[in-house]
Image: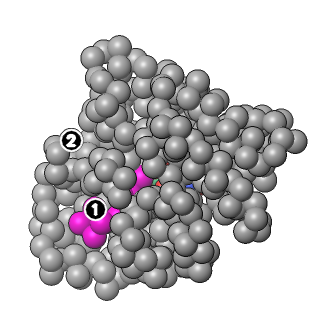
Amino acid sequence: MKDTDFVRSAYGVWIPKILYGTAWKKDRTAALVQQAITLGFRGIDTAAQPKHYDEPGVGTGVAACLKAGLSRAELYLQTKFTPVNGQDPTRIPYDPKASLAEQVAQSFESSLRNLQTSYLDGLVLHSPLANERDMMEAWRAMEAIFEAGTVKQLGISNCYALEQLERLYRQAGIKPALIQNRFYAETQYDREIRAFCRQHQIVYQSFWTLTANPQVIAHPVLQTLAAKYQRTPAQIFFRYLTQIDIVPLTGTTSEAHMREDLAIFDFELTTGECDAVTTLL
Ligand SMILES: NC(=O)c1ccc[n+]([C@@H]2O[C@H](COP(=O)([O-])OP(=O)(O)OC[C@H]3O[C@@H](n4cnc5c(N)ncnc54)[C@H](OP(=O)(O)O)[C@@H]3O)[C@@H](O)[C@H]2O)c1
């Protein structure tokens, strides 16, 4: 990826404009992560949530690439702290009876071990907690990790209520620099949240981007742009998102799609074309 294919966050971290997501890959995780990085992905998203992610597998894939000559600094690696209610009770990567603060610390330590790294580029709270007291206890524990220097920035995921994001932003000592949300019609594509992100230099990351939007992908506007640029409609949609400051995640398991997803930076939509896609959302 070229220098222009990265966005600089509020904390000065360079984030690739498309990230490789590692959920649901089970025992193929290491090989797919290695393949994605080898083909050119420079940003990896994972989570300390064995139910959906094989974090040690991600670490194995990353380690293979570092052994082959890539430097850790060239890679953007982010993980998540998943609260107990998002975990498989038989495979929780921390002591569920410990305090929330302790759970966050233990989870992060296990992520560093799994990913075979001394620091991470982002730590994301996988979902808001049931009440504000718990939410802030978890966030303070994440801030302590930031202060210790082992993570460069913090974020939140699955946060769809603007007031909740605003409250977190107000109370946080270390402000959220990232949000990772499902990008779909049901939440009006997070229009208000994204406006808040723009104001406060929070990087908005989208998931479920292709899966949740078949009607957008199939729309004549995208089909026409795909024909014009000789790209697939999925490429047009991903490219559009990067041009409106959204960082999409792709968890593709296909080499052809990996290549296509990386090739979105080889062309650029005009402002008018972006506006035309915006009317579909
Ligand atoms: N924070 C959260 O709660 C949360 C929740 C879900 C996901 N995530 C993150 O987001 C990542 C992505 O997950 P996702 O839900 O967005 O779905 P995804 O795993 O990327 O899957 C999307 C589908 O799109 C296909 N695809 C990918 N690139 C394509 C292309 N260029 N053209 C056509 N089809 C393409 C894939 O099929 P092929 O494999 O055949 O390409 C797959 O069927 C996850 O791995 C995870 O890191 C986070």
The kind of residue tagged 1 is Thr
Q: Which residue is mark 2?
A: 1
Residue in the picture at 81% in, 36% down: 95
Q: Residue at x 23, y 82 (%)?
A: 276
Above or below for 249 versus 93 = below
Q: Secondary structure at mark 1?
A: helix
Position of 281 with respect to 165 (left or right) is: left
**In the depicted view, which residue is nearer to us: 244 or 125?**
125
Q: Where are the magenta residues, as a range?
A: 242-249
Tell me residue 205's x, y (percent).
43, 59
Residue sitting at x 67%, y 38%: 105
Check the image and report above or below for 117 versus 76: above
Residue underneath mark 1: 242
Q: Amino acid at mark 2?
A: Met
Query: Going by the image, does 42 lie left or right of 215?
Result: left
Q: Badge 1: few (under 14), some or many (20 or more) residues near its Cα, within 10 Å?
A: many
Residue 15 can be seen, yes or no: no
Q: Position of residue 129 (x, y in %)?
A: 72, 62
Task: Name which quarter of the figure residue 210 lies in.
Answer: bottom left
Classify residue 41 as left or right of residue 91: left
For disc 1, does the CB lie below 8 Å from ligand 1? no
